[in-house]
Image (spheres, rainbow, N blue to C red):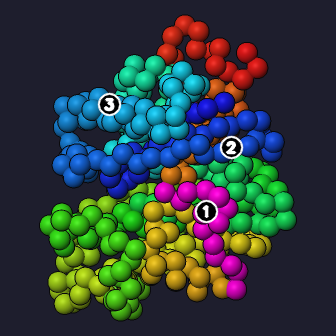
Amino acid sequence: MHVVGLMSGTSGDGVDAALVNITGRGRFLKARTLAAHTLAYPRSLQQRILSASVSGTVADVCHLNALLGEWFANAALLVIRQAKLQPTDVAFIGSHGQTLHHLPHGIHATGVGAIRSTLQIAEPAVITERTGITTVANFRSRDIAAGGQGAPLAPVAHALLLKHARRARLVVNLGGISNVTYVPKGGHLSGVLAFDTGPANMVLDGLMARVTDGRLSMDRDGKLAMKGEVDSRLLGKLLAHPFLSKRPPKSTGREAFGPALVEELIAIQQQRSLSIEDLLATCSMWTAKAVGTSRRWISGEIDEVVVGGGGVRNRRIMSQLATEFAPVPVTTFETLGWDSKVFEAVAFALLAYQTVTGQWGNIPSVTGANHPVLLGTIVPNGPRWRESLPGR
């Protein structure tokens, strides 16, 4: 079955699309990427997304929801053409959407207690209408409704696609937020543990955009961070952040490690006369050490560390991860045949496949949900959409 996965991370810089062929179920599941593509947002759209996540009006969110639906649909059509296929060759699309806000701990409401919520936009009805392909979206809300945090969800893909019969692997994703998945030997879901560890590209990209007035959106390959010196006093302050010592299950996002933290770091930089290189070096070290300290929550032996996500190209972070986990070998998704940049898009293709084939998509021990659930909302392309299901 051909499935397209669509993902845009917390940095809001574009849509990653992956066309994946998926067969089988459970431990017999197999997946292969046929094509992958990133449709970059213009800087003006990225700024609108980031602004809407902090201070957007209802009108802003309403418009962006429809607009991003168009972008996601275009990304899907592009990757289908890249694979030299037609939309009719694709069974489903799995769209994560664009996270605008994530409140895993909830806000108190009189009479009902803390209400957890999450909001991903990029209207799936628009995606279905433009592509003619049934779309599965809004994955996180069902887990939250079942008492979970709605994150992380990629560990299902980590366990099914990155497992090894004789090695226990720690899978590290360096996206906007860093997270880890412990995959025991054989990849049995009952032994999987996963959680967010703290910030990664979100803080580093935010700092670069801030100090260059938006001219640069990242420290490419960690070149500036490699030139800087770690400020031990600032690093100590960052490592004392309460999220790092919080027990799993736990998830976080822009609310904790977004613009407000970037402004705080800029103020410290100016007060202490730190160079941008030193600030980036210190925050890169923070990311790596936050990942390293995740071992306190993992009782099983780790035979190999596998790193993916955009941060895999940051040489400062990768160098420090090798130090943190020595003598355990640290490798990348690429060595296992997967593209780090688009693996999360692959993950949401897989989660859509899980949903339409009637398989659980969350791991309660990871998200904190009360029970396993089928994830997502299905927007059918027509009355005969079920004919795309395997075995029909």
Label of residue 31 in the image: 2
Give the image location of residue 89, x and y in percent.
57, 25
Residue 78 is labelled as none
Q: Foreground: 245 or 270?
A: 270
Position of residue 41 relative to residue 72, above or below, is: below
Q: Which residue is mark 3?
A: 70
Three-letter code for the amino acid on which mark 2 is drawn: Ala
Q: Is residue 386 found left or right of 169 in the rendered image?
A: left
Disc 1, SS: helix
Please give the label number shown on residue 333: 1
Residue 323, image quadrant: bottom right
Q: Considering only order in the chain, which callout, 1 or 2, is on the residue closer to the N terminus?
A: 2
Residue occupying image coordinates x 72% and y 23%:
390
Q: Which range of residues does the magenta coloring cover? A: 327-341
Residue 383 spot, x, y in % from top left: 55, 7
The stretch drawn in magenta includes residue 189: no
Inspect the image, locate mark 3, and give the three-letter code of the amino acid beneath it: Glu
Q: Is 391 situated above or below 164?
A: above
Label 2 neighbour load within 10 Å: few <14, some 14-19, many 20+: some
